[in-house]
Image (tube, rainbow, N blue to C red):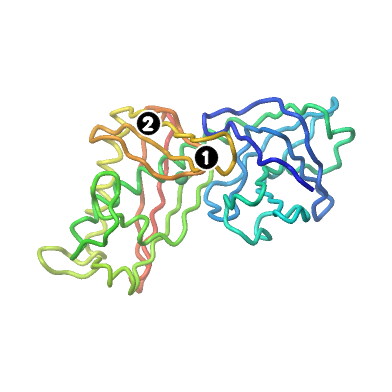
């Protein structure tokens, strides 16, 4: 089987489009994966599954099929079978492989291959996921700034504003849903070795005692950024699913950039509020941030 890497339109915010069906592939549980040449659907990424799949409808040969899931598929250079999600043995973007958006439907669509499919993403759900994802990136920058005094030495990795990049150095997992982004950070030995401290000293309280102040600093920064109605865009070097895209946000202090495969707001003014809730595990080894956007 040889198929070209799917072209995607979701980075620009598209939620609909028409495209020829290239293949229909049976999945476990009686479901089918429909592959089109291009799509507005954002699939779950198999390497970094932070943003959930788009849902919606795929209409082909006059029949509307609910898209109940959307996954990443890949076909290897040996022309073997199509692999799905966690079964893919290489990281996203391996250029020897074809990378496919799989629209998962319940029944086998008749006469699909060669016909044009009408693709419609559930736009309300997409908007909520985009808000949560933009909130996730803003939280990263605001948290990096609020925790900057806790670095005893330069960890060598800084964010767009020059702060030590706590978010990427401590990140264990990041998961969005339609309500919030939940970011889990590991405060273990390796972070301590890089220079981060959770203990009291040098005019700082212990992180556990400082959590309220850190939360307030983060929330104040998030509120200021939303008030500035900063523009958000995705820099897209190519139309392929695997193109290395960058989230860019024109914040008052300058442009922030983060590599990102997801979907986003167009302006921070689309939100009326963005607040985070920080919690530290009892043993102090894990910090969790739950960041909730409210749409304007
Ligand atoms: Zn992202």
> Could you tell me which residue is drawn at 35 percent across and 49 percent down?
140
The label on residue 129 is 1
Residue 131 or residue 88, whichever sits in front: 88
In the rendered image, residue 154, in percent from the top left (x then y), is placed at 21, 61
83 sits left or right of 275 in the view:
right
> Could you tell me which residue is drawn at 23 percent across and 35 percent down?
253
In the rendered image, residue 235, in percent from the top left (x then y), is placed at 44, 34
The CB of the residue at mark 1 lies under 8 Å from ligand 1 = no
Element at label 1: helix
In the rendered image, residue 201, in percent from the top left (x then y), is placed at 13, 69
> Could you tell me which residue is drawn at 80 percent across and 52 percent down?
27
The label on residue 268 is 2
Q: CA distance from mark 2 to mark 1?
A: 14 Å
Q: Earlier in the sequence, mark 2 or mark 1?
A: 1
Above or below, comparing residue 198 to residue 35 in the picture = below
**On-image quarter of the C terminus:** top left
Residue 33 or residue 157, whichever sits in front: 157
Which residue occupies the extreme right position in the image? 110
In the rendered image, residue 127, in percent from the top left (x then y), is placed at 52, 33
Above or below, comparing residue 116 to residue 43 in the picture = above
Q: Quadrant of residue 183?
A: bottom left
The label on residue 235 is none
Residue 239 or residue 69, whichever sits in front: 239
Q: Quadrant of residue 249?
A: top left
């Amino acid at each position: 089987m040889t198929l070209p890497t799917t072209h995607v339109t979701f980075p620009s915010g598209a939620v609909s489009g028409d495209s020829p069906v290239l293949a229909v592939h049976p999945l476990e549980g009686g479901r089918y994966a429909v592959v089109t040449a291009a799509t507005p659907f954002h699939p779950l990424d198999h390497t970094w599954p932070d943003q959930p799949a788009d849902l919606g409808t795929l209409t082909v040969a006059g029949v509307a099929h609910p898209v109940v899931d959307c996954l990443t598929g890949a076909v290897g250079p040996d022309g073997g079978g199509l692999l799905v999600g966690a079964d893919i043995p290489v990281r996203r973007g391996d250029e020897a492989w074809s990378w496919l958006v799989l629209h998962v439907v319940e029944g086998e669509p008749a006469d699909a291959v060669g016909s044009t499919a009408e693709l419609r993403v559930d736009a309300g759900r997409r908007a909520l996921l985009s808000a949560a994802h933009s909130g996730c990136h803003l939280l990263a920058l605001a948290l990096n700034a609020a925790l900057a005094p806790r670095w005893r030495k330069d960890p060598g990795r800084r964010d767009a504003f020059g702060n030590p990049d706590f978010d990427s150095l401590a990140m264990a997992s990041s998961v969005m849903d339609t309500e919030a982004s939940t970011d889990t950070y590991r405060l273990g030995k390796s972070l301590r070795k890089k220079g981060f401290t959770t203990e009291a000293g040098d005019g700082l309280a212990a992180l556990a005692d400082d959590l309220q102040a850190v939360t307030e600093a983060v929330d104040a920064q998030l509120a200021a950024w939303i008030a500035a109605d900063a523009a958000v865009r995705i820099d897209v070097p190519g139309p392929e699913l695997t193109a290395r895209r960058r989230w860019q946000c024109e914040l008052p202090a300058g442009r922030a950039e983060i590599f990102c495969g997801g979907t986003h707001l167009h302006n921070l003014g689309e939100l009326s509020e963005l607040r985070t809730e920080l919690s530290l595990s009892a043993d102090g080894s894990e910090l969790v941030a739950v960041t909730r956007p409210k749409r304007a």
